[in-house]
Image (spheres, coloured by chain):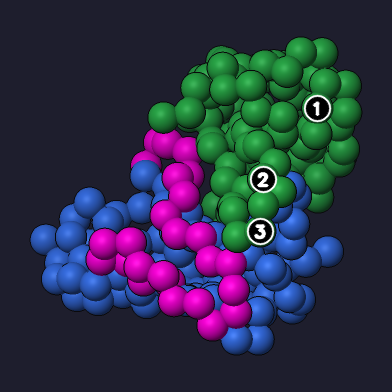
Amino acid sequence: GQQLNQSPQSMFIQEGEDVSMNCTSSSIFNTWLWYKQDPGEGPVLLIALYKAGELTSNGRLTAQFGITRKDSFLNISASIPSDVGIYFCAGLNTNAGKSTFGDGTTLTVKP
Amino acid sequence: DAGITQSPRHKVTETGTPVTLRCHQTENHRYMYWYRQDPGHGLRLIHYSYGVKDTDKGEVSDGYSVSRSKTEDFLLTLESATSSQTSVYFCAISEPLMRQGMVNEQFFGPGTRLTVL
C-alpha cells in the first residue's frame, strides 16, 4: 500500500524559532493535507493543498505541494508555546476517498 | 466543532474479552472511519464505511469488525481483545465532495483509550 515518510519524528525548539517538516511518498497524491493534534485530542485540519507546486498559508503556517506530487512541506514561523503537538501529513487521491497518514512530527517549544 | 462523540472514553479490559467502541455523529456525514494511534505509527486505518451497511477494511483490520446500521453510529468490535490492541482509537467522519479543488476533510472524535491487560 501507499506509505508516507514524515520527518523529523520530533523537534525541540526555542520559542520564536522557525520550524520545517516534510513528508515524502513512494507514489503520487492529488491532495496533501496537514493536521495538528493537541495533547489528548483528535487531529484538526490546518492546511489543504490541491495542485502541484501550490503554496498555501494559514497565519504563521505555510505549506507546499511538491511539484513531483510525491512530497509536501510545512513551515511554522516564529513558533509559540501553543504550537506544541503532533503534526500529521496526509495524502489522498480522490475527493471521496480515505487518507493515508504519515507517522507524525512531535513538536516541543521551550519558552 | 463537528458533532462527534466516542464512548467509552477510557476502558480497561482483559485479554480474550469482546469489546465494542461506539462512534456517534450528529452531522449526517456519509463516511465514517476507525483509526488506531500508536507511538511511532501515527494513525492507521482499521475499517471505514461509505454508508449504512457499507463497510470496507483498512490496513490493520485483523481482529476487528465494524457495523453501521444507522448513519449516525459506527461500532468497532474487538472480537477477542489482545494486548497488542492496547491503543488510542479515533473515529472520524467526512462528507464526499465531488467538486474539484474541494478537500475531503476528516473531522476526528476525541478518542478512546483502550488498555488490554
Q: Quadrant of residue A102?
A: bottom right
Check the residue under mark 2 and report the chain it is in.
Answer: B
Position of residue A85 measured from the top left corner of the image (x, y, whole percent): 36, 53
The answer to whether tags 1 and 2 share a subunit is yes
Q: Which residue does the numbered mark 3 point to in the structure image? A: B100
Asked if one can make out residue A70 in the rendered structure from this viewpoint, the answer is yes
Which quadrant does the C terminus of chain A fall into?
A: bottom left
Q: Chain B: what color?
A: green
Position of residue A108 measured from the top left corner of the image (x, y, whole percent): 29, 61
Q: Which residues are magenta?
A: A39-63
Label 1, label 3: how many angstroms apart (C-alpha)? 22 Å
Residue occupying the far bottom of the picture:
A68
Q: Which residue does the numbered mark 1 point to in the structure image? A: B51
- Seen at 65% across and 37% down, the residue is B95
> Hey, what amino acid is under mark 2?
Leu
- Work out whether A50 lies above or below A54: above
Q: Which residue does the numbered mark 2 point to in the structure image? A: B97
Q: Is residue A49 magenta?
A: yes
